[in-house]
Image (spheres, rainbow, N blue to C red):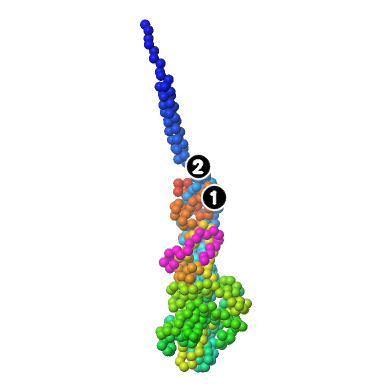
Amino acid sequence: MRYMLKAVSPVIALLMLIFITIGVSVVIYTWTTGYITSYETQPTGFEEIKVEAYKVDGKLLTIYVRNIGDVSVIVNSIYLISPTGVVYNLSPAVISSSTKIWGGDVWTIDAENLQVVKESSGLIFNDTFTEENSSIWDNDYVNYNNDWSAIYYDIDGLKLLSRSDDGWAVRGLISQSKIVDLTNLPIIIEVDLQKTNYNVPDYDAAGSPFAACMYLSSAKNPNPYYATPWFAVKLYPRASPSRTEAQLVTRNANIETEVLYTWYSAPNTQPRGIFLLIFNETNKVYYYFWHDGRTELYASGSWTSTGLTQVFTKEKQYIYLTIDNSVTKRSRKVHIRYIQIYKDYKVTVSNVAPGWTVELTDNAWNALYSTVALASSVTFNILNYIIENSMPLDGHIRVYTYNVTEFNMYGGWRILPREMKALTVSIDNVPSGEYWVKVVTKNGVEYQYKVRIP
């Protein structure tokens, strides 16, 4: 019997080999990628922590925790356990200050009472002249060529009145001592001066020949114009045309003037100028100026002169506040609402630790400035606040013994592999004694260490 055998076509055989190869490749690829994906999603390391040391500072306990594993850990619980089994759940401390912050202040952490307290004040003095202050001012010394004069204080501030006995007269205050030291910069002065239209024809104070002045001089004279060299800010009258200029002025051999603003003669004028002066470079003054109220800043810049250089060489200075007046018929009046003198446009907070968050807040506890400490102190430059709001800062200093942003992001202290981090918590209301401190990570890994609370 004869059998007929048919061979597979070479073309079909080739196609079958291709299909088989593709199928096997798909299977291998799927298995391999699935394995790799599965492998990559598995933990590659382990969590392990160790407490290496601790420190007690008043009511603060700092625990030094090292991550000895090979993945990052997040510590979110710290406990103290007494020998009798009492457990204290410890939290980071939030420490705050009282209000009224001045440029130049240095504040520090009082760990015993968990407060931020003032270590040294930046304020030299601040006077709103609602009552006489003989510890700062001499009311009687500055009185030159007056036929009649008066100084009085009320709820609105200082009022200086003068009537000239023919020619220029001066009446006002001088500081009891030399209180501005230009060898110890910076020094900041803010003063609010106004020419009132009291007894002025047509109520035109801008066109009337009297001035509101603050002088800065190392010399003492009943008429500060002769206490050379001096630096002054003035609301000063000019003629042709009649007007009042807001000026920076110096006098020694010569008078040098910088005009910041001009009020021209007109009925019902009462020129008012607020000068913010920052002395933070030798022989130069930086100024900010507002006219007719401290709302919109009108002028700013820096100024130097030969006379100012000579003032700096005299070191400590008196402050004069005066009405300079040439009116002989009826008295004129100057109004000074306040003067502030303080040491700097920066605020420092000391005795903090790296990683703590330090804030300056307003009185409603809204953060105005915030930073994470990199060293044992933090310094805020608050010049923008001063320009916008004047001083003092009616708010608080608030210190968190942790990095707020990081803590909120991770739900605890994040410690990288091999990193040691200082974790500071409050032990307020924890009695003295021996304890075990238990540190626990978010994933439940824990470590216990014996501590003593004094």
Q: How many marks?
A: 2
View extreme (top): residue: 1
Secondary structure category for the residue under label 2? loop
Residue 440 pos. (x, y %): 47, 49
Instruction: Identify the residue at image location x=41%, y=26%.
Output: 19
Amino acid under label 2? Gly
Instruction: Identify the residue at image location x=45%, y=82%.
Output: 264
User: Residue 419, labelled with which disc?
Assistant: 1
Instruction: Identify the residue at image location x=44%, y=30%.
Output: 25
Q: Is residue 194 left or right of residue 343?
A: left
Q: Distance from label 1 to label 2 (Cα)?
A: 16 Å
Q: Is residue 181 left or right of residue 424?
A: right
Check residue 444 for magenta coloring.
no
Instruction: Identify the residue at image location x=47%, y=80%.
Output: 262
**Residue 208 in view:** yes
The residue to which callout 2 is attached is 45
Residue 202 pos. (x, y %): 41, 88
What's the magenta region? 362-381
Residue 406 pos. (x, y %): 47, 54
